[in-house]
Amino acid sequence: MFFIFSKILNIFILPLSWVFGLLLAAVLVKKQPLKKQLLIASIVVFYLFTNDFIADRVMTAWEIPAIPQSDIKGKYDVAIVLGGFTDYDDSYTRIQFYHGADRMFQALELYKKGMVRKLLIDGGSGSLVGENVEAPHVRNYLLSIGVPDTDIIIESRSVNTRQNALFAKPLLDSIAPHGKYILVTSGYHMRRSIGCFNKVGIATLPYTTDRQGGPVKFAFDYLFIPDLKAIENWEILFHEWFGYISYKLAGYL
């Protein structure tokens, strides 16, 4: 129920939904002064949420900073890779990677360099209808590029970050009890992920990937020209903020 409720409520916390709501209200209201105010408000909201500079500064403040590989001391038992970065194309019978796939490829680099012994692919299906169970497809991909089956662990039941942690714990306890674990996920998702894993008693080294925030630039287009990439970052942020607060209230963090 919590999963379904969060998916539905997510629609109403997106900036584009607010812009659409203001425009719709402007069309429906009869009073001209109010109509004009609603139109102005929709333009202002759209401009603020498509400003790269503002979105980047807020995103950078929220993301957990990345660490260099030189900060990884000794060999870790498992790199826990949180899912949500693939789909499966039935037409071509192959996996498709999205921008979050940086999680997988950064963890794979750690594995290839001998910095971690095993990879745990932690992710089932994030859709309401339960399609595209992710971890088995990622496992097949890793096998196809030469990663031994003995070094791949999959958790394919979870539908959210709370369950990522909850279902990973017995697997880790059976394979490397009291081991050293690296948690690999996107920068914007790391704050909630660390909290969930700590809550179930899994201490990890956070390894931030897929960073969306960028350095400060003083280019005219970056400072003033609307960019849809900015509104995408705001949608990511609102989703994470809503998730973080919901998890906090539910006692998952």
Image (tube, grey):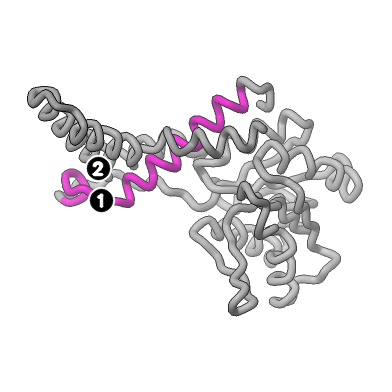
Q: Return the residue at label 2.
A: 51
The overriding secondary structure of the stretch rendered in magenta is helix
Tell me whether the residue at label 2 lies in contact with that at label 1, contact meaning CB atoms closer than 8 angstroms: yes
Residue at disc 1, secondary structure: loop
Spot occupied by residue 196 in the image (x, y as percentages of width and height): 68, 33
Q: Return the residue at label 1.
A: 227
Please tell me which residue is depicted at 74% across the width and 50% down the height of the picture: 74
Quarter-wise, where is residue 144 in the image?
bottom right
Left/right placement of residue 65 relative to residue 176 reads left
Left/right placement of residue 171 relative to residue 84 reads right
**Three-letter amino acid code at disc 1?**
Asp
Magenta span has 234?
yes
Please tell me which residue is depicted at 72% across the width and 40% down the height of the picture: 163
Q: Can residue 215 be seen here?
A: yes
Q: Residue furthest bottom?
A: 92
Please tell me which residue is depicted at 61% across the width and 23% down the height of the picture: 248
